Image (cartoon, helix red, strand yellow):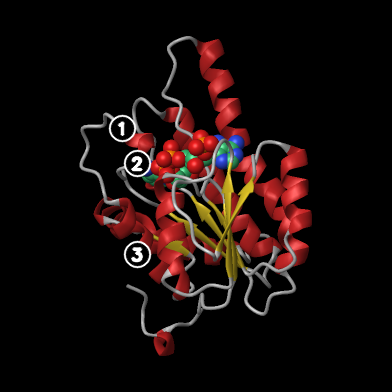
Amino acid sequence: MPMAPGSLQFDLKDRSVLITGANRGLGAALCKTILQYSPKIIHAGYRTAPGDFEDPLINWCQLDIQDEASVAAVAASIDTLDVLINNAGILMPTAADPVKERANLEAMMDMHLHSPLRLIDALVPTLQVSNQPMIVNMISMAAFASVPGCEGYCISKAALHAATQGLRLKHPDIHCGGVYPGPTATDMTAGSTAPLADAMESAAAILSGLCERKTAIFPDEAALAVESLVGAGVATLEQQFTTLLSD
Ligand SMILES: NC(=O)c1ccc[n+]([C@@H]2O[C@H](COP(=O)([O-])OP(=O)(O)OC[C@H]3O[C@@H](n4cnc5c(N)ncnc54)[C@H](OP(=O)(O)O)[C@@H]3O)[C@@H](O)[C@H]2O)c1
């Protein structure tokens, strides 16, 4: 359940939110959970088909983040925006054939790095009109160490992690945060034997972290274990590097 309004540093009430890949998985869980905060509107992006849930506050919009025309059309259609959640993602397992593996890596770099950055560039002017603009990138705890069988995915998420730090430098007027989930029960992990977090529980934790304006959100048990190993160190380094080349 949402936190009491008085304790929020950021209140989603009456906010305009865009979520990519909102039709299923963590994106759908985020959509449904944000509704509990009484937003102004949720622009719920879908690539292939809208989700199987409806609400007067949900505006389903076709958005293939890898398609420039689709990104431009959605950016042009949104008048006000407070929160952009770059959630859409894809996991292509490591391929034995190096040519196929390089193609997969290219596809995931496009999906997790170039396309979110293009969408951000298109929406920054609209976000900057908000009194508390926010960009939230769905990264992964696998950004911090490679996982066998999905090395390319980890590379692309590490790139998005670095890009999120870069966005904080580039757009100091916009709160830019990263979410680092562990394995979560969605289509992406179908067939996995790993313990899986519940998507709705993770969505609740993500939104609590967002309202606390955290720059790094670790929304489940596996992610919290990663945070205890690297969280403080990564945050300290990021701070130290801001003056690395200025002396
Ligand atoms: N599940 C996990 O264990 C886990 C862990 C860490 C991080 N994450 C990250 O969390 C995010 C959500 O993952 P999930 O588990 O919810 O995945 P999912 O269930 O596989 O859903 C992926 C979503 O991304 C959308 N999508 C794919 N390509 C797109 C494109 N070009 N343009 C727009 N939307 C596109 C899909 O739309 P369609 O329905 O049209 O395909 C779908 O809505 C991803 O970034 C993922 O990497 C997931």
Closer to the observer: label 3 or label 1? 1
Mark linked to residue 190: 1
What distance separates the C-alpha of mark 3 from that of mark 2? Answer: 16 Å
What distance separates the C-alpha of mark 3 from that of mark 1? Answer: 22 Å
* The quadrant where residue 230 appears: bottom left
Which structural element holds mark 3?
Answer: helix
Query: Left of 54 or right of it: where is 182?
Result: left
For label 1, the crowd category at 10 Å Cα-Cα, with few meaning under 14, some 14 to 19 and many 20 or more, is: few
Mark linked to residue 134: none
Do the residues bearing badges 3 and 1 touch, measured as CB atoms within 8 Å?
A: no
| Vertical comparison of 122 with 95: above or below | below
Q: Which residue is mark 3?
A: 205
Comparing 144 with 222, the one in front is 222
Query: Left of 92 or right of it: where is 63?
Result: right
Decide if residue 89 is in sight here. no
What distance separates the C-alpha of mark 1 from that of mark 2? Answer: 7 Å
Do the residues bearing badges 1 and 2 touch, measured as CB atoms within 8 Å?
A: yes
Q: Amino acid at mark 3?
A: Ala
Q: Confirm if mark 2 falls within 8 A of ligand 1.
A: yes
Query: Left of 201 or right of it: where is 142?
Result: right
Q: Earlier in the sequence, mark 3 or mark 1?
A: 1
Q: Which residue is mark 2?
A: 186
